[in-house]
Amino acid sequence: MLNPRTRRRLPRRLGVRLVPRPGGLVSPAPRSLRHPVPHRARWEDFERAGLLDGLSGPDRSTRIGVLETLVDENVTIDELRAASRDNRLAHLLLERALSPKGSYGIEEISQLAGVTVDDARRWFRAIGRGVSEDNAYYNEGDVSLARGLKQYRDLGLDEGGVFAAARVLGRNIWTAADAAEALLQDRLAAAGDHPEVALRYAVEVRRIADFEAQILAHILATNLRQQLRSDAVGIAGDSNLHIRGSQQIGVCFADLVGFTLLGEQGAADDLSRVAERLDRLATDVVASPVRLVKTIGDAVMLVSSDATALACAALDLVDAARVEGLPPLRAGIAWGTAVPSAGDWFGRPVNMASRVVAVAPAHEVVVTGEFYDELETEEFWCEPAGSHRLKGIDSPQRLFGIGRRSVA
């Protein structure tokens, strides 16, 4: 629940009303910009700065409401003039609404959370919050964020693992924020000379973020349960296995042939769209027990302890890229012992798969002999793809092209 200090402060911010919900969560509810009786001195300042030029009637009153709101958030007249000149008043209002400036310094955060200042800084950097020496930078949400580190420690969790998981979370949150920001930019551009529209966007984005936090919690719990179940099965079958330790696993890299040349000849926006289409295809094609680990520009990385499922996913992805009209896709797969860490995988099969894909022909899936030995061969045909000296691999490797057998 919010403490009294927060209750007094938040309802005045940006005309947003907080609505209590079960479990102590709060969500901002839509509310029109307030239309205050303007301070005469401020009104005159707005006039002199040219911030009300060309406006009259309701439009003028609404704009005054926007400007008053920003001034209350300590935005200076010079900042308002610059934002207006650059057509960024809507952006400025949205920024302040989404992340109001706090009143805590890092020392206060550490005291309230029960962690050292150095730990608070390190935690914020890891999780993507950022660190500032500003004595009025952090807010109540940051206090809760710092307390999370204390709670993890109280559970006795491994410190290195906790920070590694935080870094993964931070990187992925930035990715999600980039995607959301692209959508908002389109909306803000359409808003044009009506920055007051940004407040409605801010309220709705805050509401969506609250809802998506619940979705993420559910998905995380569901996937964690599946991981624990998979680990338990592995431990039952081999007493030498340890939870999240080294495992026998298949690793697949699939990349687009000619993507580098496309980048030299085309625009950055074209590259971005192609990479996004590959990411979407991989997300659509991949299903448990195969997992999409990451996308790396023109490539995706898949893993699975089920060799047959991984081979099927690779073949499906190559076919889907062809149907989609993407540049030719190819895939390389290896098998061996790898170790999961912070959302990624490390070990020989990872290195091997990344080398195998480099020699695979377009539209084909090429695998190592170790991987082929793990397949249910009645489902696939196999043909030798020659012996190759792969970069960073000491001995030549015999590789094989695979495909599905036709069903009579």
Image (tube, helix red, strand yellow):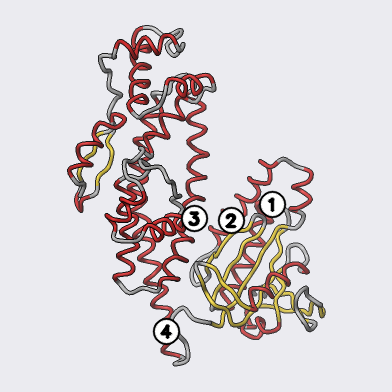
* Mark found first going from the N terminus, 2 or 1: 2
Residue under circle 4? 233
- Tell me the kind of residue under disc 2: Leu
Q: Quadrant of residue 121?
A: bottom left
Relative image position of residue 74 (x, y in whole percent)? 37, 28
N-terminal of the two: label 4 or label 1? 4
Q: Amino acid at mark 4?
A: Val
| Residue at mark 2 to residue at mark 1: CA–CA distance | 10 Å
Q: Are marks 2 and 1 in contact (CB under 8 Å)?
A: yes
Residue under label 2, please give it. Answer: 281
- Distance of mark 1 from mark 3, alpha carbons? 25 Å
Amino acid identity at mark 3: Asn
Q: Which mark is residue 378?
A: none
Disc 4 and disc 1: Cα gap in Å? Answer: 39 Å
Q: Nearer the viewer, mark 3 or mark 2?
A: 3
The relative height of residue 38 versus residue 308 in the rendered view (above or below) is above
Looking at the image, is mark 4 or mark 1 nearer the viewer? 4
What residue appears at the point 50 percent right and 38 percent down from the top-left corner? 183
Q: Secondary structure at mark 4?
A: helix
Distance between the Cα atoms at labels 3 and 4? 29 Å
To which residue does mark 1 refer? 326
| Neighbourhood count class around disc 1 (C-alpha, 10 Å): few under 14, some 14–19, many 20 upward | some
Q: Position of residue 359 (x, y in %)?
A: 78, 69
Query: On residue 172, which mark appears?
Result: 3
Q: Earlier in the sequence, mark 4 or mark 2?
A: 4
Looking at the image, residue 278 lies above or below residue 306: above
